[in-house]
Image (cartoon, rainbow, N blue to C red):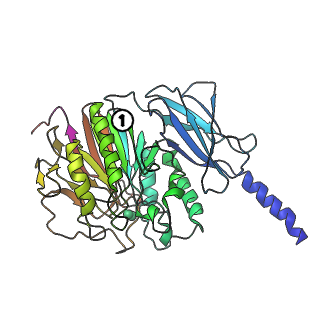
Amino acid sequence: MRNLFPLFFLLAASLAAQPPDQIHLAWVEPPSTTLTVVWRTVDTGVPSLVEYRPAGAGAWLRAQGGIRPSGTSGVLHEVTLRSLRPGARYEYRVKGPGESWSAIHQARTAPPPGPASFDVVFLADTGMIGREDGLTTGTKQVIEEVARLDPLLVLLGGDYAYYNTDKRFGTLDNTIDAWFNQVQSIASKSVMMPTYGNHEIYLREGYLPWADRLPTPEGFDNRRYYSFDVGDIHFVSILAADSEYGPIPATAMQWIERDMAGARKAKKGWIVPFLHVAPFSDGSNHPSNLDIRAQLGPLFEKMDVKIALSCHDQSYERTYPLRGVPDAIQTTSTSKSCYSAKDGVTWLKVGPGGKMSNINGKFADFKTNPPPFYTAFRDNTAHHYARLRVSPGAIAVEVFGVQGDGRPPVVQDRFEYNRKGCPNP
Ligand SMILES: [Fe+2]
Ligand SMILES: [Fe+2]
């Protein structure tokens, strides 16, 4: 037994010397002038330090933060960089054990408040690369493609690790650690802002093990609902895990309404909500959540929401702009591609972001054929992620389909809302 001690100490020492990992960015404070950097070190004695500088500048500036309580092995560090220039590029590196620092990473602040140009990607239902049941056929390539798109912001739609059916990493926390390493190529340079799905909320996972890793503004109900502004867009993260979790609580609905009314009053150009379950879905695995449709439909119309993002099912569907949800649904346009300020709400269900379904072992089948009258486009032959190309007065949405076999992604669907009107209204 005594002979094993040196081995034990060697192993412990080599683990502690492990370089920083799980590097990811968030916005807790104003996005145009701050960035919050999170990373993990196995060595619990490493100080929470970030060195940063405007891209191309010589001398490093230094910011200190603290430990973010979490279930990771080692410690999660959190440092907020403040007084940054809006719409600017920065380089940064995070502290590792001993004298070491991480590699140098790139980051950007948001443009100043008001109309601006930037890209946002919506991504959900990823799963972990290399599942033994073979269902994550797209995860690796989706991550590579989103990293290549290099958006300013990534909205995460929930269902990340599917721990209940993927135990390769042992504990839930080890699995979450692996998930953050899996997305570091995106998250170290694009700010990631989450909502959560049924897998985080109750399928042998939990809200806190995930939310502890992902800083966000305070919002409501311990950050289950929160909002933030980038450029001229007010983003609202809405927890909607699925029908087993029940409808959105009345107090949360009141918070969402007050929050959106505040954005309207502040004359924000757009309100973009994102949530996990799909209020409009013809998928046989996860059909429309009618409770949540009835809750959010009238509110989104009242608040002049144009684009509502959801996921959960394993296929892509997009409605025409709708009004009269839930009881008198009408399309406000029959165009496939361009909508104006007078049009209603387009409901998107964008998925999966890498993992096919455990229910039917593939992408979701559709329940009805031909599709419902309000469906503008749908596809269940690929993994999907959406890019919002934001410019002053317009948001153009491109939805990419990817097989995961290395063939390039295909833009399957494209439409825009343009406040200046459409070429052929
Ligand atoms: Fe899912
Ligand atoms: Fe889900």
Q: Which residue is the site of mark 1?
A: 118
Residue 221 is situated, as x and y percent measured from the top left of the image, at 43, 50
Residue at (42%, 32%) from the top-left corner?
Answer: 110
Residue at (53%, 49%) from the top-left corner?
Answer: 184
Camera sees residue 209: yes
Identify the image quadrant of the N terminus.
bottom right
**In the depicted structure, whether residue 255 falls above or below residue 126:** above
241 in magenta:
no
Q: Amino acid at mark 1?
A: Phe
**In the depicted structure, whether residue 244 falls above or below residue 225:** below
Residue 281 is situated, as x and y percent measured from the top left of the image, at 25, 62
Identify the image quadrant of the C terminus.
top left
Q: Nearer the viewer, residue 277 or 254?
A: 254
Q: Nearer the viewer, residue 24 or 261?
A: 261
Q: Is residue 345 left or right of residue 205?
A: left
**Quadrant of ligand 1 in image:** bottom left
| Residue stretch in magenta | 416-421
Q: Nearer the viewer, residue 365 or 308?
A: 308
Residue 35 is situated, as x and y percent measured from the top left of the image, at 51, 35
Residue sitting at the far front: 251
Image quadrant where residue 388 sits: top left
Q: Is residue 347 left or right of residue 361?
A: left
Count residues near mark 1 (Cα–Cα under 10 Å), then give few for <14, some for 14-19, many for 20+: some
